[in-house]
Image: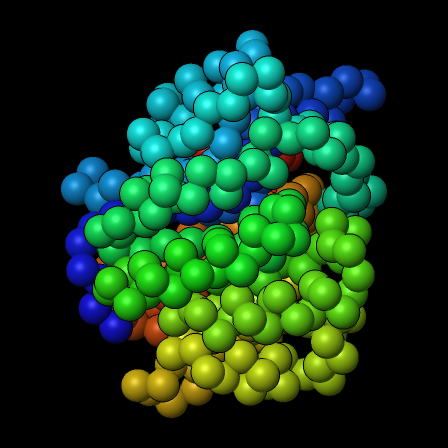
Amino acid sequence: MNITNKSILHIGECMIEMSPIENGEFKSGFAGDTFNTAWYARRALSSDWIVGYFTAVGDDHWSSEMLKFFARSGVDQKHIIKIKGASPGLYIVRLDQGERSFSYWRSASAARHLMNDRAAMRDALQGQGAVFFSGITLAILEPSLRDAFLSEIAQARKDGSIIVFDPNLRPHLWESADVMRKVINQAGNHADIVLPSFDDEQAHFGDRSPHETLKRYGSSTVVVVKNAGGEIVARDKTADDFSFKPERIENPIDTTAAGDAFNAGFLTTYLSTGNLANSVEDGAALAGKVITQLGALVE
């Protein structure tokens, strides 16, 4: 799989994150599944790569602070849409022995309107070496705009971009589980690389093993099934299947963004080298590092 140029565009929603520190207090930051992957990718890739983000933000204080954070992070923001009177969504993290749960305030998030200007998205996609999006990217869109989104993704693929998709199944964001499964399957058929999580796929598609998940996304060239510390299985149509058991992390501090970090570790190695085994190992190593610290984005 050859990348046409050293650029990767991430598409989705970045939110205000309130994460716990000590004594019941919280700190604010910015995070979201596709942005987390972009943030980690920027740190893993050399300076000759362009790591971009496409979303919609508002014109309020928090949108301004978010864009400043993007700039400090080295994430290219030239294609981001600004919507008058809008603001970002917000979520609060709750931790229980390292496992996280979330409360969200995102119904009026500006990012829900990232497809309102289809021409802007088409312009952002043009000439990208790779494009990354998730099931959450699709879930937050108006249902009438999802086909248009996937149509633009399909055109980018025809034009030479490598399409990368993380299903990231979050049923509470969808109208129904049936709609979620249908759209996720459609998106998977448009992708060259699919990065599902077995626990999600088992819960919502009924897969009995990571190998079943691997097979179900078999139309894609590369599939890597993340497995929450268990055995990771991967397939590249140009090589034999690969499995890898990550080193166990005792007493994880915070599993927030572990999958997003895996995506970044895997992609940055795979897009640079094409080596499936090394890419899976690098993804697992970065995820393992992230869960030993608090927050979605850790140095």
Residue name at image x 55 percent, y 86 percent:
215
In percent of width and height, residue 284 lies at 49, 60
Residue name at image x 77 percent, y 18 percent:
25
In percent of width and height, residue 181 lies at 69, 70
Image position of 69 with respect to 126: above or below: above
Question: Quadrant location of residue 161?
Answer: bottom left
| Residue 265 in view, yes or no | no
Q: How many marks?
A: 0
Residue name at image x 42 percent, y 17 percent:
68
Direction from residue 65 to residue 168 in the image, left or right: right
Residue name at image x 40 percent, y 59 percent:
153
Direction from residue 255 to residue 163 in the image, left or right: left
Image position of 130 with respect to 89: above or below: below
| Residue 112 in view, yes or no | yes
Direction from residue 79 to residue 63 in the image, left or right: right
Q: Quadrant of the N terminus?
A: bottom left
Which residue is more in the foreground, 29 or 25? Answer: 29
In percent of width and height, residue 295 lies at 62, 34
Direction from residue 103 to residue 220 in the image, left or right: left
* Residue at the bottom extreme of this rendering: 240
